[in-house]
Image (cartoon, helix red, strand yellow):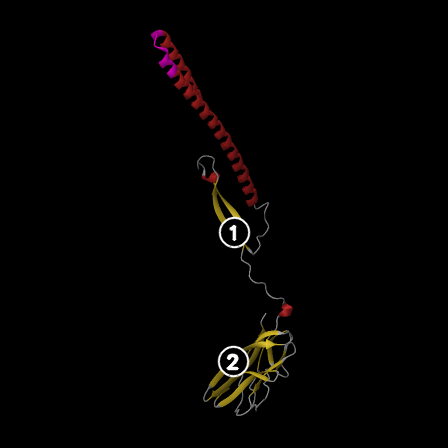
Amino acid sequence: MDFAVCLLFGVILTNCVSGLQEESGLPEDPIISLQSQIDFLMQKVSELSRTSVLQKVEIDDLKTENRNLLQFLSEVKSPQQHSQKIPDNLYVYEEEKIFDGNKATDIQSVIRKERLLLPLPQTTPSPPKENVVAFYAYMSGDFLNPGGYQTLIYDTVITNEGNGYHSATGNFIAPQTGFYVFSWTMRLANGEYHQAELVHNRKVMGVAYLYAPTGDHMVSDVVCFHVNQGDDVFVRTQGGANHGNIESGYGGRSSFTGWKLN
């Protein structure tokens, strides 16, 4: 419509100028100058018209792409076509995107939420079960009046992954080579005193000493060292002065535990 109006205006202006030239007998030069300006304006109108046509084509293409994209998103979000469960290691991130040829006139057709499935950060995988070595055992009752260098027996086994702990003897025989953590706890009461040492292949690796003047008292120790497959680890009383029982019951368990670092 704008192009037609401009073209009509140019034709009328040209005719008017030509009529004035014939009736007034004015010199040729001003008329020629006006005609040149009109030709220049007509050229600009033609260029603007071509630009308008190209923009309309681009807008139509964008609208077509927008319709196709909205159709695709609608199909993706359709519960009938995509009813599979989202894996646990994925989370949904929603991002708003605006699709519009010229301006936002219809919110329902302009704004769409695009769901992007992004993987959660992965944690370090657990080691295979066959590589796990761990044990925990405690005394089912009081250990009566142990003397010096007596191996302590923890007869109630709660955990024994790898089958390295032997409740009949109180010894742990390493099923695999590696670094191990060991901890032992001793409970005494009413004037009892003992020193409990952890031994690895006849070498003392740690000592826990406790004197309980009155009431119940507990002590524990933790060590970490390298153990070869088949090595022997156990807890025993230290030589020298030992007095009384080693208590174990509901008031506190005397226990022995260890595990391999993977």
Residue count near mark 1 (Cα–Cα under 10 Å), binned few <14, some 14–19, many ≥20:
few
In the rendered image, residue 190, in percent from the top left (x then y), is placed at 47, 89
Name the residue tied to disc 2: 221
Identify the image quadrant of the N terminus: top left
Q: Which residue: 52% across, 80% down?
A: 221
Contact flag, marks 2 and 1 (Cβ < 8 Å): no
Q: Is residue 207 left or right of residue 21?
A: right
Is residue 129 placed above or below 235 in the rendered structure?
above
Residue type at numbered disc 2: Asp
Numbered label attached to residue 92: 1
Relative to 225, residue 106 above or below: above
- Res. 71 image quadrant: top right
Q: Start and end of the magenta stretch?
A: 23-33
- Give the residue at x 40% y 14%: 14
Q: Which mark is residue 167?
A: none
Q: Above or below — where is 241 with respect to 89?
A: below
Front residue (pair 233, 201): 201
Of 250 and 109, nearer the camera is 109
